[in-house]
Amino acid sequence: MVTYDTLKKAIIEGNVEAVKGEVSRALNEGVEAPSILREGLIGGMGIVGERFGSGEMFLPEVLLSADVMHKGLDILRPLLTEAEQKAMGTVVIGTVEDDIHDIGKRIVGFLLEGNGFRVIDLGTNVKAEAFAQAIEENKPDILGMSALLTTTMLNMGKTINLLKEKGLREKIKVIVGGAPINEDFAEKIGADGYAPNAGSALEWVKKAIAG
Amino acid sequence: MRANYIQYSSPQFRLLSDKQIEELHLATLQIMERTGVTFECQEALDLLGEAGADASNPRKVKIPSYLVEQALRTTPKTITLYTRDGEPAMVLNGMTSHFGGILALEEYLDPYTRQRRQCYVEDIVDITRVMDALPNIEWIMTDGALQTIPGPIADKVSFLQTILNSPKPVMPSMVDVSSLRETLEVSAMVAGGEKELRDKPFVMAFSEPVTPLVQGKDALEQSLLCAEKGVPNLVFSMPMAGATSPATFPSVLAILNAEFLSQLVVIQLKKPGAPVIYGAMPTIMDMKTTIYSYGAPELSFLSAAMTELGHYYKLPVWSTAGEVDAETIGAQAAAEATYQFLLSALSGADLPHGAGEMYQGRMASPEFVVLGSEIIDMVKVVMQGIEINDETLPLDLIERVGPGGTYISESHTLKHFRKFWVPKVFDRSMAKREGIKSCEDLLNEKTLEILKTHKPKPLSEDLVKELRKVEASWLKRVGLEQYPKRE
């Protein structure tokens, strides 16, 4: 019975050689690729997420873990179907129109990718129409919007309204974040959720996709 | 009579040596020539291109060092700020620190209920009056971030309440260039004309590059307008070590310096001689919580080094003092604030800003402003020099009082004891077991007392009438009859 303990440990420690080694070993022993991805790589990142949330691990360490996780995923990729690759979910993120701040959004993107999500980052100063178009094209599970200014955050509501008009709103869940944002605001504009930082955004996305 | 004698009139504080500052300056020039800076404003790109910069790629404009040297030559080395009523208030010349308060953040710590809640317009009036009452708070910065009134007018409304309730110089946060333009029109009305406002500025503006190395459209447009109108303009970015800049401190300084200097070049090309204030708010990204940390000691440390860089260019420097991560007025808030007040004074920053700001930039507290004022008093004690003369070192007196004597009833003591600092809020009463009031309670009492009794100098009735008309037009613009009242 495979326990993946060694693989998970390697991910937590950010040890790329050990990750690659463990993934290859598991494959050689006949373990199925989707299982290694789900229970080994993503399982390891789950522990990393917990430790980040409790303050035991620091963000640069988390990002290193995400990086080595991807090196492991690269070995599995040719053996995964497209559906299996997309298994975790797809997230579209962007900073809203007229706003050019993006460090928070980028960190959310890194964490999501590190946990097996496919992330489409539209960048900054993203108009409502551009968000809508990206949703139509990529059919994501989640839309994440970021804003740093009290004026630009109003464009979050604008985007959500446009999605409603286009019949796209019910097809996705929307989460918002950024320094001036809070739960009340998220509720007011009709978002599904709000997260005060990247770590809780990741947890929210995981729950939102799970059901 | 003394010979070859040096007396320090203040502590001597240096983080960077002369050679290190030069090295940082050269590294900054390299960043500007090699890496380049993004400019998102066509007018700025045109000015730069015409002057000899390589503006062929707006994402990476390369600026040659001679343009920087030219810009530094034409930028004024001192700026005099006036009160709203036209009286000289502060001279920014690298010689003295003038501490400022900040208000109109999203939340407010209500001194009446002692609860944190949304900020209302009435709160801005109250906290302005508290700042007006405290001599240690010499100027006021507004954030315009309150969410109880619509975004398109929040910045202007915050500014208006401030100038109605205090004559102290103001630095309002403006959301875009058209809002700034309107605010300057109102300011000119108060000053008695555009020329009067230019000659006796009581309003400063600011523009924020986005780290790393991005000059946004709004920020540039506001700077260009300030240059045109002769409004003293602060340029400051907020780098986070480890996130938007490398995690090592000299690189934070080089990047913020490049962000300042690249914008300075554009401003001086637009209008040689435009008054500009150097500044930055560098800190770390907290790697556990991912916040921009206000209370981090690194913020004070980097700000102090940044101040030395700004003064190397002989420009007035804006820094930070009194802005904390803590959400309650207690040990963490006091420690974080004290560190900032002390380091900004030791570094000699001209305009340390932010007394009253708590909870990672989200909340303003009038009680915390009062505590800030108390801490500033303590800082001033450290900043005084030590002068040795016959009066301060009275050997004859020491001889007369002799071993085992006492000085308490000497006329020399009577003459000099008033120079000891007397706390206004800290308790030294040696009170009995019961009845010792906590510092937080004393702060609260003092704040409520100020709110009850202090009457700021008002503007003339005619002027107030005109301003209220302008205010009404803003309200109308967003479909309001009056401001939402605080509960």
Image: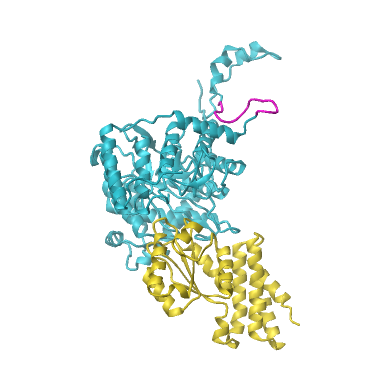
In percent of width and height, residue B156 lies at: 34, 47
Residue at position x 43%, y 58% from top?
Answer: B210
Q: Tell me if residue B426 is in the magenta stretch.
A: yes
Asked where in the image residue B442 lies, by quadrant, the reply is top right
The quadrant in which the C terminus of chain A is found is bottom right
Chain coloured yellow here: A
Magenta residues (range): B421-435
The foreground one among B365 and B314 is B365
Question: Does the image show residue B325?
Answer: yes
- Residue B335 placement, left or right of B59: right
The colour of chain B is cyan
Question: Does the image show residue B382?
Answer: no
The foreground one among B52 and B153 is B153
The foreground one among B164 and B142 is B164
Residue that lies at the very extreme toward the top in this rendered image = B400
In percent of width and height, residue B232 lies at: 34, 44
The quadrant in which the N terminus of chain A is found is bottom right
In percent of width and height, residue B400 lies at: 64, 10
Asked where in the image residue B391 lies, by quadrant, the reply is top right
Mainly helix, strand or loop, the magenta region? Answer: loop
Is A160 rendered above or below residue B21? Answer: below
Is B135 rendered above or below residue A127? Answer: above
Residue at position x 55%, y 42% from top?
Answer: B337
Is B51 rendered above or below residue B97? Answer: below
